[in-house]
Image (spheres, rainbow, N blue to C red):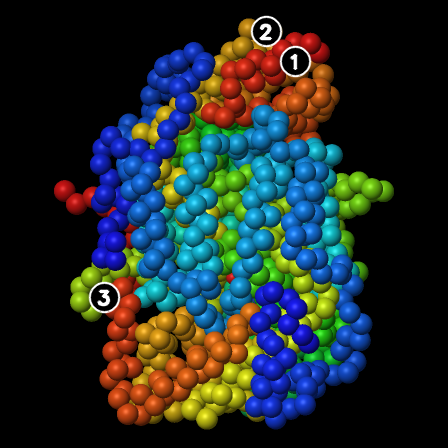
Amino acid sequence: MTSTFRYLPDTKQDQQDMLDFLNIQSIDDLFADLPSSIKLTEALAIPKAIPEPDLIKKMQQLSLQNIHANQYPLFLGAGTYDHFIPSVVSHIIGRSEFYTAYTPYQPEISQGELQAIFEFQTMVCELTGMDIANSSMYDGFTSVAEAAALAVSTTKRSKVMVSQAVHPESRAILKTAATGPGYQVEEIDLTTDITNIRDIQEKADDQTAAIIVQYPNFFGSVEDLLEIKKIAQEHGALLIVSANPLALAILQPPGKLGADIVVGDMQPFGIQISFGGPHCGYFAVTKKLMRKIPGRIVGQTTDAQGNRGFTLTLQTREQHIRREKASSNICSNQALNALASAVFMSALGKQGIRQMATLNIKKADYMARQLTEKGFSVNNQSPFFNEFVVTLPVSASEVNHKLFEAGIIGGFDLNKDYRMNNQMLIAVTEQRSKQEIDQFITILEGL
Amino acid sequence: MADYHQLIFEISQSGRTGADLPESDVDPIELDEKFPKHLLRETPAELPEVSELQLVRHYTALSHKNYGVDNGFYPLGSCTMKYNPKINEDVARLEGFSRIHPYQPAETVQGALQLLYELQEDLAAISGMDAVTLQPSAGAQGEWTGLMIAKNYHQQNGENRSKVLVPDSAHGTNPASAAVAGFDTVTIPSNENGLVDLEALKKRVDQDTAALMLTNPNTLGLFEKDIVEIAEVVHEAGGLLYYDGANANAILGKTTPGKMGFDIVHLNLHKTFTTPHGGGGPGAGPVGVTKELIPFLPVPRIEKDGDNYIWNDDEPLSIGRVKGYYGNFGILARAYTYIRTMGPEGLRQVSESAVLHANYLRKRLETHYESPYAQFCKHEFVLSGSKQKKLGVRTMNIAKRLLDFGYHPPTIYFPLNVEECLMIEPTETETKETLDAFADSMIQIANEVEEDPDIVLDAPHTTVVGRLDETKAARKPVLRYTKSV
Ligand SMILES: Cc1ncc(COP(=O)(O)O)c(C=O)c1O
């Protein structure tokens, strides 16, 4: 062993001194308790070390084999959106006091992180209209499954109902998760672009733990939560809403419409699209469910002098507590991205996020109206936020191909998940200019 | 700003903003014409209103009240708080990685797919497994994924095995993951040497055993030298062996879970593979499996077709999807960069150095603190504060006193089977000088416990807040800011 790796500081002398102190001849002596049958005799079959200057070049080259959103305008959304991120966000989360810290187990030297998360929890409560929010989950999709697990364990019922207008990946994860404890997942049909209320009525029963909907839903349309809540209430089921936080700048918060659990992903707020992760799930509940909320929560308290301070609290599943009966196993979360989104929300502020949400509505509305004028049919019959579905004369993949040739990344092909032939889900964020939208439409017209 | 204690909401003033957006370049619309009234927000969300500089000062002040690996020594056992390389951060932020959408056609993201594919191969080699999924977002999600694979595997064989065996020294996520995957847990006691009690294991293994979850080296930092026999016992009963590889820092290039006889492995990239902990996350918990179990891995999978990388989500026996898209890509890119930086020789040196450091530090401390196990440790070790407890000082006090010396304390009161446990993991990236200075401080504290216990009992003395009232926090939870009127 020699010290030729920049992360390994031991000199030969250091090593010798430590071996001498331990009264051993070589480092191998420390591995003598490994049975010889399991010892590796050859080097790991992985590529050789690459010096930093060469490695950064290699990684740049690899990254350039991807077409990215700074090169081609992006009309893909479907759960991950291209939004403006102010420069302050990466500068704050790039402060290594934040990003190289572990979970704030020692509150006296983690007040920065703890306070930032306490502020994050407050912001999530403000947006969702809920009483309590945790410090983050893996992503919006897994949060849906966590919410279902909470509902099943609280109500002690055996079925959750999920609208087909909930993101296909949320539903896929939910189905995987349900086979663990063994609860049933029943899907609710659509009426074109929204959840079919009659179908909920027909399927809901006294074994229904929760009804899960998305707001705005996968097609961009805004569900009428009040009507759905009514049915949930009749059957004593919880209402779980998966919501885009940006839309909540404008839409009535689910908490005001009777939601028991609100989840979603903070990605629209200051988190890079980054090929789908890391993003940041959020999880908010009513007071009634406070002690059942999964994950870590920061609470305010005082020290002996009466100074305000913050600490992890209501800890239910950290390493020192046995959780044979757990309904969640989450430990590490996405704290740094929660911080990113808190910085984003602080930067844009009360007015800024409304302004951004309104820009999204306007641009999506503009594009949909232009498409309609040009004779394409927009499927959404309910009001939509920044996404909508358009019917195309040919397959979505063919259209995307044409768009790509013209330097545009087109929308989400609905054929695979919904068997909706020739239909595409288009996201129009504030990042898309009128010119880009017009160019997209011109290409469609040329088909 | 040293005495800055305000919340961002408390410095907010109506009319300020920290970001600006362009004017709309499309026609205006009326929101209340587009949306029914009851679906529109009546009052805005009360988010802060601060200028950009106020915002920067606020978070900078908060960062000064936080402690990371870049600030100093962080020997938090079971957490592998090693250096988080800067090149990894730069790579993850390259726009060709950070600005790509998960639903772009595969042809337009070949670089990202190649990275993921190669990382899968590397982790398979490092863990001795035949295939790896990168989907799980953290260790606990990896555990659950692995157990769901075990469950589906047994079901496919026509068996509904209901039990997962977990040693008493296991991390709390192990039994929690078993519960979430729908299993009952059976606890396996440790023997007086801190290792799995083989006889007890034999008694508890039966045809209802779906899997044994094991950490090796275990959470006491000891290598389970009976591992081959343990594997045989479980396999003979038809069970699977699950490796909790959250902390694999002692085995790189020395052995593999595959060689030890494990069938399923998860690795925490946010520990062994240098991706930062971020104050709690994000991480990544890839799962590797042996050949037999490949059909059950989550979908989608990345495959190579000639020179192209493609997605495959058509695997009928798969447990399904466990995470959105394809995992925490930005974290995976950092781990890939680290593995390329170190290569096979470097990774082996990582483990050798981590183990040397742990043994050195342990020996420096064992004259002052009780060291319960004689066997050489691996990348971490436990001490017991039982001697100090007799003098009225708890391990919690020792941890708090370490704060005064500028260190992050070790993990405490875990594992559960060691009284007044201190769990110390120095890692390979620290210098001998740092280890010595830390040992000196620990020894000074041990002396203080004997000579001047109050200074330890009243610690910390130097932090921005004193000991916090955690009981109050839990009894009367204040979990958000509310404006006082
Ligand atoms: C031994 C062990 N297993 C599992 C975990 C859980 O990993 P994560 O926090 O990434 O979910 C940890 C991390 O704390 C660990 O140390």
Some atom of ligand 1 lies within 8 Å of the CB belonging to the residue at label 2: no
The residue that mark 3 highlights is: A303
Residue at image point 29% right, 37% down = B51
Quadrant hosting ligand 1: bottom right
Q: Is residue A132 left or right of residue A387?
A: left
Eye-nearest disc, 3 or 2: 3
Quick one: SS at disc 2? loop
- In the rendered image, residue B478, in percent from the top left (x then y), is placed at 26, 54
Please report, as a chain letter, where disc 1 is located: A
Amino acid under disc 3: Asp
Q: Is residue A121 left or right of residue B361?
A: left
**Which residue is disc 2 drawn over?**
A374
Secondary structure of the residue carrying tag 3 is: loop
| Rendered view: B224 above or below B287 | below
CB of mark 3 within 8 Å of CB of mark 1? no
Residue at (37% x, 18% y) in the render? B31
Amino acid at pointer 1:
Leu
**Which one is earlier in the sequence, the residue at label 1 or at label 2?**
2
Relative to A174, does residue A24 appear above or below in the rendering? below
Residue highlighted by disc 1: A444
As measured in the structure, the alpha-carbon distance from the residue carrying label 3 to the one carrying label 1 is 64 Å
Disc 3, disc 2: CB below 8 Å? no
User: In the image, residue B389 lies at what x, y percent?
Assistant: 35, 88
Residue appearing at x 80%, y 75% in the figure: A41
Tags 1 and 2 touching, CB below 8 Å: yes
Q: Position of residue B46 (x, y in %)?
A: 28, 37
